[in-house]
Amino acid sequence: MIIGLGFDLIDLTRITQLLERNNSGLEKLFFTDLEREQFEKIKNMKRRIEWVAGRIAAKEAFVKAIGTGFAKNVGFQEIEIISNPLGKPEVKYLKPIELIFPAYHNVEFFLTITHSQLSAGAVVVIQGIPTIKE
């Protein structure tokens, strides 16, 4: 059953300005070590901007889907967006998901990220099976 849905849209101009002002600090604030490794492999500036905007949009969509926003000890560093070998972005929550969804098991996350010339957007769907208490 679907237990969460989140969407976010990021203006690429905003990300361009952030990257131009504070290149090294931005990655440390928003991204995990593994995400930074993927980011460093991107050499094209336009692609870097899209990548950063897409990952931030995905993390924002994730916290909307779990219903907490960036509160209750959920921060950018606890959410990891990594591309699988085929390039598909996947979301991983680095803390026990049972803390957020104690009434569900087999919780899964589904993520899609898209870009246009002006923005990047992401949708996260969370699915889980209700735990039956006897």
Image (spheres, helix red, strand yellow):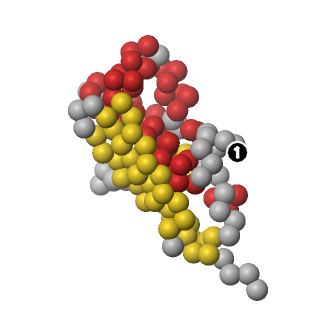
Q: How many marks?
A: 1
On screen, 20 above or below 48? above
SS under mark 1: loop
The answer to which of 80 and 123 lies nearer the viewer is 123
Q: Which residue is mark 1?
A: 72
Q: Residue furthest right?
A: 134
5 relative to 7, above or below: below
Q: Is residue 35 left or right of residue 77?
A: left
Image spot of residue 120 (x, y percent): 33, 38
Residue 73 vs residue 66, the one in the foreground: 66
Which residue does the image show at 47% across and 16% down from the upper left? 22
> Could you tell me which residue is drawn at 44 percent across and 13 percent down?
21
Q: Is residue 91 visible?
A: no
| Residue 105 screen position, x and y as percent | 61, 71
Residue appearing at x 69%, y 65% in the figure: 102
At a point 36% along the width and 43% down the height, the residue shown is: 121
Q: Position of residue 14 (x, y in %)?
A: 39, 24
* Residue at the far bottom in the pictured view: 134
Quadrant of residue 118 within the rendered picture: top left
Q: Is residue 104 visible?
A: yes
Seen in the picture, residue 114 relative to 111 is either above or below; the reply is above
- For residue 55, which quarter of the picture? top left
